[in-house]
Image: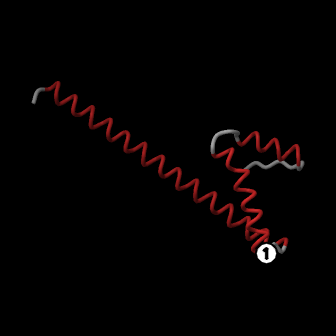
Amino acid sequence: MGRAEKRRQDRKQDRIEQELRHQILRNTQKQLNDGRIEAMMVCMALGLHQEFGFDRDDCMRALRAVDALMDPWICGECDLEDMRQQVRDQIGIEIKC
């Protein structure tokens, strides 16, 4: 095997390794985001139940509504700032973490 062939194989291996690292990073970020969303939904259900007496059906209705509101953001149809502006306009509170 000549030097040129060795360099081609090395570049190919580097591209494969780089794609694998990117895929691992994407999967890790997705798992982290999924975990955060699940934690937010769990805390919301507990808060609604403990603070406002929501029963199972009320909590499910609220969680479904939240899930439906999140879809445009997840799909990229709107961004977080758009949603923050809606909260400011409709409710009068500012949410920043």
| Percent of width and height locating residue 54 | 81, 72
Task: Indicate the quadrant where residue 60 lies.
Answer: bottom right
| Rendered position, 93 above or below 40 | above
State which quarter of the image contains the N terminus.
top left
Q: Give the left or right position of residue 43, taking residue 16 as reference.
A: right
Which class describes the residues within 10 Å of circle 1: few (<14), some (14-19), or many (20+)?
few
Circle count: 1
Q: What residue do we see at 64% from left, 63% from top?
A: 39
- Residue furthest to the left in view is 1
| Percent of width and height locating residue 55 | 79, 75
Q: What residue do we see at 83% from left, 74% from top?
A: 53
Q: Give the left or right position of residue 52, taking residue 38 as reference.
A: right
| Percent of width and height locating residue 70 | 69, 50
Secondary structure of residue under mark 1: loop
Q: What residue do we see at 58% from left, 53% from top?
A: 33
Question: Residue flagged by tag 1: what amino acid is it?
Answer: Asp
Q: Give the left or right position of residue 61, taking residue 25 as reference.
A: right
Query: Which residue matches tag 1?
Result: 55
Coloured how? secondary structure
